Image (cartoon, helix red, strand yellow):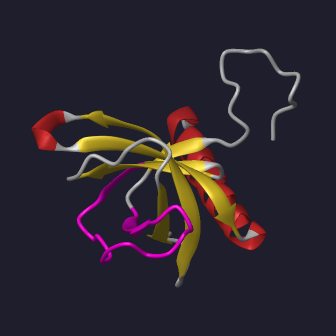
Amino acid sequence: MKSKNYKGPERRTYLRLEADYAIGYIRLSDNLHPSGDIVEDARPKDIGGAGIKILTSEQIPAGAFLEAHIKIPATSKFITAICRVVRCEPDKKRLFSTALAFVWIAKKDREIIDEYVKKIKLNMLRSETKI
C-alpha cells in the first residue's frame, strides 16, 4: 500500500493488472436490491484491490451500484463485491469501458485479489529480467 502522502506519478493504493477472469454482475437499485437479471456477457479489462474495469454491452450511469461476481483464476470460488460505477465510456465495437470501485468487499476477498495481482506482476518482472 502506498502512503496517503505519496505524490508520485502512480497514486493508486493497489496495483492493477490486465487479467483474464470471469465476471458477472447484477444492477442494483438505490436501496441495493437487485433490479434485473445477472449479466454474464461482460469482459474483464483489469483488476486491483480497489476495483475492476470491465467491458459491458450496456451503458451504465456513473454512480449506479452493481453486485459483481468475480472468479479469480488462482482460487476455486467466486468473490462477491458491491461496486459503484465510477465512469462508463464508449469503447470500440459498441461496448462500454466501465470502471467499478469496490464499495463493499470482504477483507479476505480484497486480499485474495491483491495477492493474485502481486503474484502475477512479480512473475512478469522475473520473466522480463531473465538473462
Q: Position of residue 37 (x, y in %)?
A: 30, 77
Question: In this rendering, is residue 42 above or below 33?
Answer: above
Which residue range is magenta in the image? 21-45
Count of marks placed on residues:
0
Q: Quadrant of the C terminus?
A: top right
Question: In this rendering, is residue 39 above or below 30?
Answer: below
Residue 49 in the magenta stretch? The answer is no
Q: Quadrant of residue 39?
A: bottom left
Mainly helix, strand or loop, the magenta region?
loop
Question: In this rendering, is residue 10 above or below 73?
Answer: above
Instruction: Tell which residue pokes out farthest to the left in this image.
Output: 93
Instruction: Tell which residue pokes out farthest to the bottom in this image.
Output: 76
Q: Position of residue 106 (x, y in %)?
A: 72, 71
Residue drawn at x 64%, y 41% as measured from the top left = 15
Instruction: Tell which residue pokes out farthest to the front in this image.
Output: 31
Residue drawn at x 32%, y 40% as measured from the top left = 97
Q: Quadrant of the N terminus?
A: top right
Residue 24 in the magenta stretch? The answer is yes
Q: Nearer the viewer, residue 80 or 119?
A: 80
Residue drawn at x 74%, y 15% as measured from the top left = 8
Q: Position of residue 63 (x, y in %)?
A: 50, 45
Tell whether 21 sits left or right of 130: left
Residue 126 visible in rendering: no
Tell whether 112 sits left or right of 75: right
Q: Position of residue 109 (x, y in %)?
A: 67, 70
Q: Quadrant of residue 129?
A: top right
